[in-house]
Amino acid sequence: MSDALDDPLAREKDLAARAAVRRVRTGMRLALGTGSTAAYAVRAIAERFPGGEGIDAVASSRMTEELARSLGLGVRPLAADDRFDLMLDGADEVTPRLELTKGGGGALFREKFLARLSREVAIMVDHTKLVPELGHRSAIPIEVVPFARPVVARQLTGQGYGVVLRGADTASGVARTDNHNEILDLRPPRPVHDAAALEASLRAIPGVVETGIFVGLAHRILVGLPDGSVQEVLPPGEPRAR
Ligand code: 5RP
């Protein structure tokens, strides 16, 4: 891909995606994430498995579904008893404890839903996504029911959060997720020392459907580095072989 060659960060994403796709085996049930890095993974899967032969996949967004189909990879709807061998996805932030911020592409609900159904979740990022704590690099998105959104936004503003309604300042207007909900991008009032507690407190607000905080869901991080190598990060204390 020409942009992978021209843009250093795109190259790192592509490297990480290719390393993750090396984990894909014929016959696997795959959950496909959303975003530019997930798109590199979809392209790499299409290269390795022409026509999608031997691949059974569900996508976390219409965008990923359309890309996969355009490359000849069959993608099917979620089934009642679905479990996935491997989920491949990107992230906006990754801490050393493998906590994630996700949802830059607006697919956080479906991504988290599929991650919970996946035996292994491999996250692919460029090196700029590594942070000591969540909230360092990106806003934390929450998916909110549109009816409730003004109340939720006011409540969070009152608690000291910076709150931005995604898309409100753009020509195309307020963004809607694939679930027809809206997204509030939050800047927490203080550093996020306890991601699980923040996740729980945000989820407890009526009208909040899901948050972009992922705790205990990622099994491995593949980080594309400027020198062309890929670093694998596992949960603290976990042996390398898996
Ligand atoms: C989409 C996501 C993406 O994985 C995240 O925003 C990273 O995107 P990119 O790979 O384009 O940097 O969570 O909802």
Image (tube, rainbow, N blue to C red):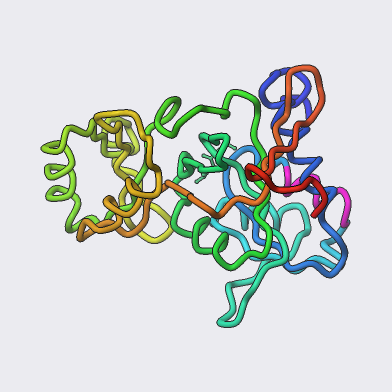
35 vs 190, nearest the viewer? 190
**Residue at horizontal 17%, vertical 49%?**
152
The quadrant in which residue 217 appears is bottom right
161 vs 168, nearest the viewer? 161
**Residue at horizontal 67%, vertical 44%?**
237
Asked if residue 135 lies left or right of residue 41, the reply is left
Q: Is residue 226 above or below residue 232?
A: above
- Which residue reaches farthest front? 237
Give how far across and how far down residue 165 sits, in percent. Answer: 26, 39
Asked if residue 176 lies left or right of residue 128, the reply is left
Give how far across and how far down residue 33 sits, in percent. Answer: 60, 52
The quadrant in which residue 173 appears is top left
Magenta stretch encompasses residue 80 = no
Magenta stretch encompasses residue 47 = yes
Asked if residue 84 lies left or right of residue 134, the reply is right
Q: Which residues are magenta?
A: 41-49
Q: Main secondary structure of the magenta part?
A: helix
The quadrant in which residue 225 appears is top right
Give how far across and how far down residue 112 sits, in percent. Answer: 50, 57
Asked if residue 65 lies left or right of residue 155, the reply is right
**Residue at horizontal 13%, vertical 45%?**
155
**Residue at horizontal 26%, vertical 34%?**
164
Look at the image and tell me in which quarter the N terminus lies: top right
Look at the image and tell me in which quarter the C terminus lies: bottom right
139 vs 104, nearest the viewer? 139
- The picture quadrant for ligand 1 comes to top right
The answer to whether residue 38 is visible is: no
